[in-house]
Amino acid sequence: MSMLRVENVSKRFGGIVANHEVSFEVDEGRIVGLIGPNGAGKTTMFNAIAGFAPPTSGDIWLDGRKISGMTPEQCARAGIGRTFQVARTFTSMTALENVMVGCFLHERSQSKARASAEQLLEFVQLGRFRDRPAASMTISEQRRLAVARALAVRPRLLLMDEVMAGLNPTEVRDMVDVVLKIRGIGVSCLIVEHVLEGIMPIADAIVVLDYGRKIADGTPAEVSANPQVIAAYLGEE
Ligand SMILES: Nc1ncnc2c1ncn2[C@@H]1O[C@H](COP(=O)(O)OP(=O)(O)OP(=O)(O)O)[C@@H](O)[C@H]1O
Ligand SMILES: [Mg+2]
């Protein structure tokens, strides 16, 4: 059984149809890329899956349990973690404190939250930034910090929204390494990304949205060769 099942999800904002009857699945232990031109409805889909803005119609299931309509906290408790396209890092707090914010979903004890946060910082190669204010970190480091904070809610599925945008090739490789490590610990990843050289080599499957509709899904090789996908991306240039 697939872990995440998105079933005929539509989302309207007044006259704008941001998602139109989109269906796809994410299997356990997979990296799935959700790609498409600007305004295709990718972040809207993340907001539906994570409970930030419920679909207008359609359903979303995690492990056979319906999560569409749940609040963000209920979705997090059900096993959905996420990062935000527009960074929500607390820049005046230290790296450790930023991650502890996520840990408090499951942990009341300050010392246990601290210990988990320390482990997560090591996991994303940010151990040395522990006591540094997040504001002093580069964009690349802050993106990995956001991933650590999302992991702190102990997700079964992690949604990452453009965590590679604007990074140089070395930094993209660092993020790719983190994503592979996340899959390695058994957490599935659904990744919205425009940096195709980051996502294509590591994805088990790719779902393509265009103007709110799913226009293709399959292996990276299949979607790269799909004429509709090529046309959608050429149209964007
Ligand atoms: N809260 C909102 N109110 C009104 N329209 C919205 C809202 N959120 C998104 N939209 C519209 O829905 C469509 C899809 O937006 P969305 O942010 O999901 O796209 P995206 O694929 O994430 O794009 P990008 O790659 O630029 O981040 C766009 O036309 C956008 O303007
Ligand atoms: Mg977006």
Image (spheres, grey):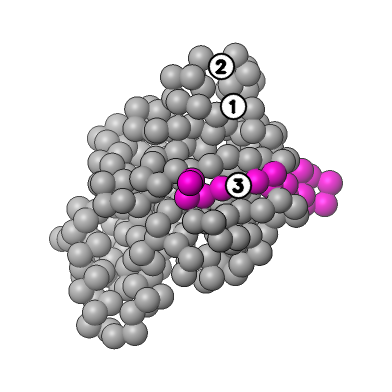
Reading the image, the residue beneath label 3 is: 6
Reading the chain from its start, which is encountered first: label 1 or label 3? 3
Mark 1 Cβ and ligand 1 under 8 Å apart: no
Reading the image, the residue beneath label 2 is: 226
The magenta stretch spans which residues? Answer: 1-17
* x, y percent for residue 176: 30, 39
State yes or no: discs 1 and 3 in contact (Cβ < 8 Å). Answer: no
Identify which amino acid the numbered label 2 is placed on: Asn
Residue at 31% over, 51% down: 186
Q: CA distance from mark 2 to mark 3?
A: 22 Å
Q: CA distance from mark 1 to mark 3?
A: 15 Å
Left/right placement of residue 31 relative to residue 40 reads left
Magenta stretch contains residue 2: yes
* x, y percent for residue 13: 77, 52
Reading the image, the residue beneath label 1 is: 216
Q: How many marks?
A: 3
Q: Farthest residue toward the right? A: 15
Q: Nearer the viewer, residue 1 or 52?
A: 1
**Up-down: is 33 above or below 226?**
below
Secondary structure at badge 3 equals: strand
Quadrant of the frame with the C terminus: top right
Reading the chain from its start, which is encountered first: label 2 or label 1? 1
Q: Residues within 10 Å of mark 3 (few under 14, many from 20)?
A: many
Residue at 47% over, 59% down: 80
Q: Farthest residue toward the bottom? A: 109
Identify which amino acid the numbered label 3 is placed on: Val
State yes or no: discs 2 and 1 in contact (Cβ < 8 Å). Answer: yes
Reading the chain from its start, which is encountered first: label 2 or label 3? 3
* x, y percent for residue 204: 40, 33
Secondary structure at badge 1 equals: strand
**Up-down: is 114 above or below 164?**
below
